[in-house]
Amino acid sequence: MNIQLKKGVLELCVLSLLQAQDRYGYELVKTISENVAISEGTIYPLLRRLQNDGYVATYVIESQEGPPRKYYRLSPSGQQTLLQLIREWNGLVRGVTNILTREQEVEQHD
């Protein structure tokens, strides 16, 4: 998958997962990588940018299994951004689907 396209999709995925519940970084990596091929090194810079942009806030909780975990929480600004990204994504998917469907119909008639 094109790296720029993947970056945009990952932002949408991260914000969407954080809307459902607060999560720590590795948990986001694990959940996303079940559906999209990513590495840990991809998510952490994105999380820093989302935090710098005010879309997520962080807090730390002590962990029974090791060092304290930094959790990410969706902010009100992040919620608004997520809604906008969902609208844009749905419009993109509809547009691409229309083009692909039209092209397949043209090929079938040739």
Image (spheres, rainbow, N blue to C red):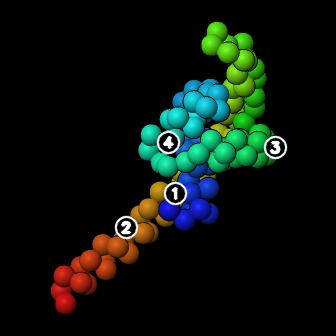
Q: Could you tell me if the residues under marks 4 and 3 are in contact, i.e. CB atoms within 8 Å?
A: no
Residue under numbered circle 1? 89
* Residue 80 appears in the figure: no
Q: Earlier in the sequence, mark 4 or mark 2?
A: 4
In this image, 105 relative to 90: left or right? left
Label 4 amino acid? Ser
Label 1 amino acid? Trp
Helix, strand or loop at disc 3? helix
Q: Which mark is residue 97?
A: 2
Q: Could you tell me if the residues under marks 1 and 2 are in contact, i.e. CB atoms within 8 Å?
A: no
Q: Earlier in the sequence, mark 2 or mark 3?
A: 3
Helix, strand or loop at disc 2? helix
- Binning the other alpha carbons within 10 Å of mark 3 as few (below 14), some (14 to 19) or many (20 upward) gives few
Q: Quadrant of residue 16?
A: top right
User: Residue visible at 59% across and 62% down?
Assistant: 3
Residue under numbered circle 4? 33
Residue at the farthest left position: 109
User: Residue visible at 76% across and 23% down?
Assistant: 59
Q: Quadrant of residue 68?
A: top right
